[in-house]
């Protein structure tokens, strides 16, 4: 398999900005976003979070297409219509990710107009 097939294009929407990053297939979305300098946390949860264990619910993003949940906490987010836990999403196919404006802990703020 070539290098090109080992990576997946992920489009990241950050406010009005759009970026495309190449992510190793099978990589965790949260880790890929952080490695590329994107912020998935609030100002405090950036320092105090569960480290990607699917427990704190502060790493949420919107994703399209939305993969099937694999983690119980992410499945609950789907069930109740909340944003997805980026630490519980494995990148296997191209996707678009919208970063969310967050308050201190990770509460999602209303979308900028
Ligand atoms: S980092 Fe805690 S739920 Fe994702």
Image: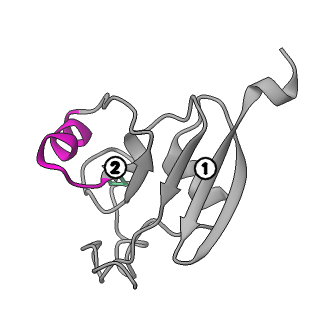
Task: Kindly give the residue lying farthest to the left in the view shown.
Answer: 80
Q: Is residue 6 left or right of residue 103?
A: right
Q: Secondary structure at mark 1?
A: helix
Residue 32: image tag: 1
Residue 82: say if magenta: yes
Q: Nearer the viewer, residue 60 or 55?
A: 60
Give percent across and percent down for residue 75.
21, 36
Magenta stretch, main secondary structure, is: helix
Q: Is residue 44 magenta?
A: no
Query: Where is mark 2, residue-wise?
Result: 85
- Looking at the image, which is closer to me, 90 or 97? 97
Q: Is mark 2 within 8 Å of ligand 1?
A: yes
Give the magenta-colored segment's residue range.
72-83
Q: How many marks?
A: 2
Percent x, y for residue 25?
65, 30
x, y percent for residue 110: 28, 80
């Amino acid at each position: 398999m070539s290098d090109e097939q080992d990576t997946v294009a992920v489009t990241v929407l950050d406010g009005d900005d759009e970026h495309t990053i190449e992510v190793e297939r099978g990589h965790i979305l949260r880790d890929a976003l952080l490695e590329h300098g994107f912020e998935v946390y609030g100002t405090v949860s950036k320092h105090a979070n569960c480290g990607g264990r699917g427990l704190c619910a502060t790493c949420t993003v919107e994703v399209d297409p939305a993969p099937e949940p694999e983690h119980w906490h992410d499945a609950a987010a789907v069930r109740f219509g909340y944003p997805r836990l980026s630490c519980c999403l494995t990148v296997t196919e191209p996707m678009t990710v919208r970063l969310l404006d967050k308050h201190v802990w990770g509460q999602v703020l209303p979308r900028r107009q």
